[in-house]
Amino acid sequence: MEADGHQSHPRDKGQVARQGLQLLSLRRFLRTLQRPQRHTWRANRKKPPEALLSRPFQKPPTPWSPDGFYEEAEEPGSWMEQYTGEVYIQELASMLPVEVLKAFLPLHSVRILDLCSAPGSKASQLALELTGESVLMCNEAKTSRAQILRCNLLKTVVADRCLILQEDGRHLAAAGSACFDAILLDAPCSGEGNLRRIPEVIERIQAPNYGRIKAENASLQKQLLQSAWRMLRPGGFLVYSTCTLNLQENEEVLEHLPMAEAEFMDLPARLGFPSCSSLGLRLWPHHWDSEGFFVACIRKRGGGGQSVAAPTPRAPWPWSTLSWEEWNDLRAEATDDWPDLTPSEVSRVARYRGDLFLLPPLNALNGLDHLLPMTTPALRLAPLELRLHGARAAAGEDWVALAAQLGGGLGAYTAQMDALVQRGAHWQSAVQIFDRLGEERLKADLIACNTLMKAYSKGGAAGAARKLLKQMRSWIIAPDVTTYAAAMKAADAEELFQDLREDGLQPDVITYTVLMGAYAKRGRRAKAEAALRDMSRDALQPDVIAYTALLDLYAKLGDLEALRRLLATMAPNVVSFTVLLKALVKLQRLQEAQETLEEMQLKRMANLISYTSLLSAFAKKGQHPMTFVTFTAAIFAQL
Ligand SMILES: C[S@@+](CC[C@H](N)C(=O)[O-])C[C@H]1O[C@@H](n2cnc3c(N)ncnc32)[C@H](O)[C@@H]1O
């Protein structure tokens, strides 16, 4: 790593110490970087994820994440709750800036600017904290990211407090000075703190041009900071944060503030951290098992503690508000999606560029007049947005479709594909969604490809599965065992199993099971038995599905002895017993079949299928009516 990066170099121990990383901690730091990032998520208090909250999630031990949780078992990125707004997937460290602001400024009836806002983790977190007549103005320079931001605000149910700006934050101060009570500047940066999540960061840091990249970042950050400082009212608070650890993009940027005006807040004292001599707080990954992060909070001297509307001359409003009567007329014609508003809320309904919006509380907009014509209110009164903003019980799939339409990005499209696959839709409908990624200039990732592969596997689309594997290589997306497991179900399992090994991947239970299933289907007994042995050689414990593939094969071959032998070596379940039962019925060994059923009954494993398969066999043979009655009674008991 570079000497002026966040890691130690003998040449530059002084700098490391200045950043607060003692050499003794260096080993812990490096060891932590080698561990994958822990998944964390934040619950939405306005829309609590009840199904998830009933599970025993662990709370992070941090003093700044009241709504944060760890998830160890699975990848929360696939949770449907993410698309319904009940959950926001947010890294632990990234939850800190909002808590810092909360510690210094009561978030009641305030005007706040989030200068670099997309995708909206902090904006959605912050907006949930606002009370009274507050507004959050969210700025994002890139249009595509501004759409994702809007979608996130809508589904978090905070859009009615937010205005969206799509401007270069460096020049925004020209339209409004000293008008915000607080400004969040979560600046674009080199992202050194993301090393655990994005291992390629290390390559970037080691590249010869890294010094130049940091200098360019620092220049942009200083300009954004200056613009933010001008827009902050005296007495207001600026929270500066980055997810990088070097000095150049943090302390050295902050040193460009006019020091006579800037009062740096003592974050360690306020948040209960060990004290440090830095202008801000640097979160080292090994301290909280988080990503690396930097945050500082600066008060602009002067002014009282009070929120005061800046005395700017009033520009004409860009929107026209509606009267109660006009609203009622509209409401009468509209669909059920339209909200019931109180008279004070109706005063916030405005017509703007041909659409209707719900504005944030009007008093909060005082003093922001010159910025307002550049903004779009985040909550458009249209069925899509209203459903995304308000409904609690909409079907997950419905949400995902809405999110995708509103620019919810790759994740939303992937979840939409997944929902279709689970519902058993034709694989072509998943392809249609996948193709839209390209149309929207979104780059598919491994999860999106695996989801499409799942669709191919369910539909048995062998050619398409092979083509996708090839395409993934050209897109530089390395297939993993999940990709192969799905592809093997669709196409030639044996050949793809070889490819998997040649790709340097270790087969898992699922890929072995698919392979055994394919052998069993083709009656290739020796190959299927060899695959079972290979599984043990690879220290994998075959599961009941793998065993059942072989049991099926023995049943098909009529080799009852092999079937019984295998059954004795495994922990059979109802499916594996039923394989034996059906084999016995097929061979007309009804006495043994009946004994097997009794054994299943004793083990409480008999089900409707087991009874009916035997019943029909007896019926065909014209057996004793008592047996018939007993079985029929048992069947009804099962129903
Ligand atoms: C670190 S990310 C912000 C993350 C965001 N605060 C969150 O919590 O989700 C920085 C954002 O700043 C945007 N950006 C970059 N240059 C900008 C500029 N000059 N003005 C406004 N936004 C800018 C980037 O597109 C990016 O979305």
Image (cartoon, grey):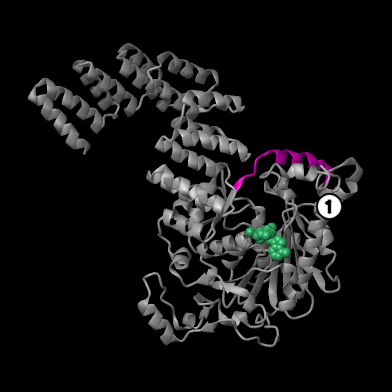
Is residue 23 magenta-colored? Answer: yes
Q: Does 6 sit above or below residue 567?
A: below
Q: Label 1: few (<14), some or many (≥20) within 10 Å?
A: few
The residue depicted at 49 percent of the width and 42 percent of the height is: 451
For residue 135, above or below residue 60: below
Dominant secondary structure of the residues highlighted in magenta in the image: helix
Residue 357 at x, y percent in the picture: 51, 75
| Quarter the N terminus occupies | top right
Picture quadrant of ligand 1: bottom right
Q: Indicate the quadrant where residue 365 lies.
A: bottom right
Q: Name the side, left or right, on which 13 lies relative to 524.
A: right
**Secondary structure found at label 1:** helix
Tell whether circle 1 marks a residue whose Cβ is less than 8 angstroms from ligand 1.
Answer: no
Task: Residue 74: tell me if it is visible.
Answer: no
Q: Is residue 204 above or below residue 174?
A: above
- Residue identified by numbered label 1: 212
Let me know if residue 119 appears in the view: yes
Q: Residue at x 78, y 39 (%)?
A: 27
Q: Nearer the viewer, residue 131 or 537?
A: 537
**Residue 96 falls in which quadrant of the image?**
bottom right
Quarter of the view holding residue 428: top left
Determine whether, in the image, residue 636 is placed left or right of residue 310.
left
Q: Is residue 212 left or right of residue 131?
A: right
User: Is 375 placed above or below 638 here?
Assistant: below
The amino acid marked with disc number 1 is Arg
Q: Nearer the viewer, residue 311 or 572?
A: 311
Q: Quadrant of the C terminus?
A: top left
- Where is residue 227? Give x, y as percent: 76, 71
The stretch drawn in magenta includes residue 498: no
Q: Which residues are magenta?
A: 22-39
Q: Residue 421 in the image: x percent, y percent?
A: 42, 44
Whole-percent x, y for residue 245 in the image: 77, 52
